[in-house]
Amino acid sequence: MHETHIEVHVGLDDTDTDLEGCTTHLTFRILSKILSEVSKAFFSDYPLLIRLNPVIPFKTRGNAATSFSLKIPENDLSTLKNLVISEFLEYLETIKGGGVEPGIAFLYGNIPDELSRLYRKALTDYVHKDYVTEIINRYKEFIETPLGYSRGLVGALAAIGASNTLVECTYEILVYRVRDNYSRDRCVNEESIKAMDKVFRDQTFLNYDYENNKPLIMPSGRNPVLLGIRGEDPVALVKALKTLNLCEDFEGWLIYKTNQALNAHHVERSIEEFRPYQTGCVKGRVVENPSIRLGGDVLLKLSSLENEYSLWAVFFSETGLGKIARYLMRGDVVRVCGGGKWWEGLGLVIHGDLLEVIELVSETFKNPLCPICGHRMKSAGVRKGWKCPACGYKSLTLSKDKVKINRKITVGTYRPVDHAIKHLIMPQSRVGRRSPCDKELVSEWIHVRKNRSISL
Ligand SMILES: [Zn+2]
């Protein structure tokens, strides 16, 4: 008998406040369960790990949501739904801490364009509840939200929308710890991380911070993620992982397709239209010499090249961008990317995660030198010419000198240092790499350990 198959998309976001990694771990648990209990489930692509707008005030710590798509016989649909919901609820019970507003969404069939738009908005802007409920109402035959509306639903639906929106992708293989180890230090041999980086650095990124002698593949804090290796090719990720010496037990691994390290949140905006809680890039002229705050953060006032509008940008010292921004001068033209926040007393301030220096002022005008004694002359008053403070010589005919300025920085694009790179931001090492979204599903895209022992 011929079975009718249905395409199902599932989006998840737990909007958890203190346990980063939970959404991806929950997704790993759900996928493991589907593969063992829904025998006819068919996956043709990786699950998505989607990072959303980092400047939204209430969000998950890693501002991550996930989604996955599969085909199943229609008869298995209720089994699938029950399984997903019960795993989700069971998982929530194990999470301590308040502020959890879980989101879960099912979509059947094609992904409507509205969800692509929702993804782009949730990545770069503030999403109002009405915006989401309107989409749900319009597609109520195809969208199910078993837990009702919650803040997490925005991420869950956006993650589904991302799946036919992404034009550039990276991949991440995430390895999950066993629960007993959560409160212990992560145990991965550091030398093996450096060795892995040496072999795989062209196909992976952000493995090790050689400046501070610190691995970058391991998160900190009490959460289920042992490590994550990021790169452009899932085959290389599995190979890279297998070279590591793990000295603690693990539950398994899962490869995600992601929007990480692509500067996906950098949309072009004008200074006039940029609003708080939006992300993006603006081009403008530096109107005042930068002010350097205690701790090395640098504040910059930018004005539009077309009109009177202006805003501020800040480069925090830990990003390393402050060291560049402090040498900018009034008159320079720059492009700044990041997320906008409202600062008391200043107004809109872009928290910069990229600084492109487009034009540097190279000349300035100075008062003329005295032709008699060589001292720098002073203005003698409006239309009164110049007067030498040393010898008293006066002149009505001398004009200002054009003087070349020795600049300490050059035109170019500056990015944060590796250890300050947050999820969406493109590290220097990724610049110019291909970002394929069409990598085939490898057989080891998910690995669940049955008999646990340490070796891979
Ligand atoms: Zn003089």
Image (cartoon, helix red, strand yellow):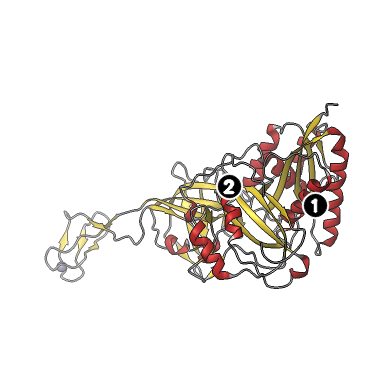
The percent coordinates of residue 120 (x first, y second) are 63, 41
Q: Sort mark 1 into few (<14), some (14-19) or many (20+) by Cα contacts within 10 Å.
A: many
Secondary structure under tag 2 reads loop
The percent coordinates of residue 167 (x first, y second) are 57, 39
Q: Sort mark 2 into few (<14), some (14-19) or many (20+) by Cα contacts within 10 Å.
A: many
The percent coordinates of residue 452 (x first, y second) are 75, 63
Q: Is residue 355 above or below residue 272?
A: below
Residue drawn at point x = 67 percent, y = 65 percent? 455
Q: Is residue 113 left or right of residue 30?
A: left
Q: Is residue 172 left or right of residue 131?
A: left
Q: Is residue 429 left or right of residue 341?
A: left
Name the residue type under label 1: Pro
Q: Which residue is identified by label 1?
A: 102
Q: Is residue 52 visible?
A: no
Q: Is residue 372 visible?
A: yes
Q: Is residue 79 above or below residue 391?
A: above
Report the residue that reaches farthest toward the top. 2
Name the residue type under label 2: His
Q: Is residue 136 left or right of residue 263?
A: right
The percent coordinates of residue 62 (x first, y second) are 67, 57
In depth, the one of 320 and 183 nearer the eye is 183
Q: Which residue is identified by label 2?
A: 265
Residue drawn at point x = 66 percent, y = 61 percent? 456
Residue drawn at point x = 58 percent, y = 45 percent? 169
Residue drawn at point x = 63 percent, y = 58 percent? 228
Secondary structure under tag 1 reads loop
In depth, the one of 332 and 144 nearer the eye is 144
Ligand 1 found in image quarter? bottom left
